[in-house]
Structure formats: C-alpha cells, structure tokens
C-alpha cells in the first residue's frame, strides 16, 4: 500500500516537473522572440562600432548575464500579461454599458416630463415608456439575453422553478399555468429560471 502511494506521489511529482519545464520552455521561447529583435538592433550597432574601431570585436556577454537578462525579460512579460488580463476583466462590460447609456438618457428625459400636464392625459408618456422598454430589451437581446417561454409550456426543472401548484381546466396537468417572475438565458445558459405555477 505504501509502495503504491509512493508510486502515485512520484508520478504526480514527475508530471508537475514536466509541466513546469514545458511552461518555462514556452516562456523562454516568447522571451527569446522579444530578445531576438533587440539582439538584431545590437548586432547592427556592434557592426557599426566594429567598422569605427577598425574591425575589433568586443568580448561577448558571459552566460550568467545572458541568463539574467532573459529572466528579466520573462518577468516583464509575465507582468504585462497579468496587467492585460486585469484590464480585460475590468472592462469586459464596457460595450454593453455604453449601449445602455442611451437607454438611461431616454429614461431621464421621460422622467423630466410631467404626464399629468400633457394634453393627451399621459397617453404619450406611456407610449414613450414602452419605446424605452423596447430599446432596453433590444440592447439586451443583442448581447444574448433571451426570455424563457413558460406559460402553457411543459414544466421543465432546468428552466422553471415551481413555487406553487394549482387546479385549473385551462391547462393540462404538468403544464405551466402562470408566471410569477420571468426567467432568462444568456447565450443559452440559464441565469435565472422562471418562477411559475404548475397544474397538478
């Protein structure tokens, strides 16, 4: 039993070591690619210096200095990737927020109006609110939000959350007879199930 545990531990350590070597190799390749551009520039500068010095070559960098420079390049690369990842998370919702700003502007304009003072008795206010609601739903649909159809559908526990049952002749047994709160999916994934009443 102990031998088996030791074998598993050894195999696990070997796998981790292999993965670390692969990651280090990938990072070294990327850093070397960045470094190669700098090296080309340095070579051009060295050639021009050699021509000025009458063809005398300067001593090459020793292995330790090359290694340290490579490590520094790799650390800079890691920091840059981490920063890009943070920026990606921070501004992931920027597009939808800028689309929703127009809806927000329209809501503010509508709320500045006094429906009671309108000549049509507030009918235009209601129509304006309907238009803003449609604009909002269009923006959300464009981003992949879909309403879950529930009323009259077969009860599906993956899409619907049954909060009560009732007896009715309007729908068959097992059908959704009322929606208490709408449910939604985002690009096919349920983010909020519909809260429904189901026929016994």
Image: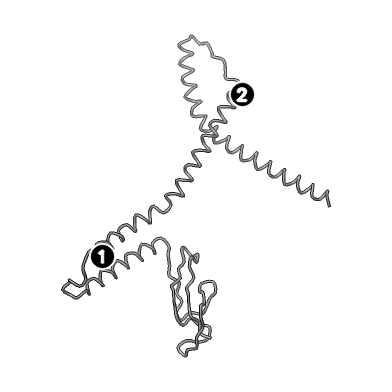
Vertical placement of residue 93 versus 71, above or below: below
Q: Residue drawn at (45%, 48%), measured in percent from left and top?
A: 88
Estimate how packed mark 1 is, as few (under 14), some (14 to 19) or many (20 or more) residues with alpha carbons within 10 Å: few
> Toward which corner of the image does residue 112 lie, by quadrant?
bottom left
Element at label 2: helix
The outermost residue toward the left is: 119
Mark 1 falls on what kind of element?
helix
When asked about the image quadrant of residue 52, the answer is top left
The answer to whether 89 appears left or right of 64 in the picture is: left
Residue 104, percent across and down? 31, 60
Write down the residue under mark 2.
64
Q: Position of residue 93 (x, y in %)?
A: 41, 54
Q: In this view, does 72 lie to the left or right of 91?
A: right
Closest to the observer: 87 or 38?
Answer: 87
Q: Name the residue under label 1.
A: 111
Residue 56 in percent (x, y) is at: 52, 10
């Amino acid at each position: 039993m102990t031998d088996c545990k030791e074998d598993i531990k050894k195999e696990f350590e070997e796998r981790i070591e292999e993965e670390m070597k692969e990651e280090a190799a990938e990072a070294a390749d990327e850093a070397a690619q960045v470094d190669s551009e700098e090296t080309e520039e340095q070579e051009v500068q060295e050639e021009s210096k050699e021509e000025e010095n009458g063809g005398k070559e300067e001593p090459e960098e020793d292995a330790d200095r090359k290694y340290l420079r490579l490590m520094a390049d790799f650390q800079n690369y890691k920091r840059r990737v981490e920063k890009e990842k943070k920026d990606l998370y921070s501004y992931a919702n920027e597009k939808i927020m800028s689309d929703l700003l127009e809806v927000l502007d329209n809501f503010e304009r509508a709320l500045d109006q006094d429906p009671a003072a309108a000549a049509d008795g507030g009918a235009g206010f209601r129509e304006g609110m309907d238009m803003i609601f449609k604009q909002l739903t269009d923006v959300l649909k464009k981003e992949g939000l879909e309403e879950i159809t529930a009323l009259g559908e077969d009860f599906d526990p993956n899409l619907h959350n049954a909060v009560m049952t009732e007896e009715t002749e309007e729908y068959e047994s097992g059908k959704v007879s009322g929606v208490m709160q709408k449910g939604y999916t985002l690009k096919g994934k349920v983010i909020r199930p519909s809260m429904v009443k189901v026929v016994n």
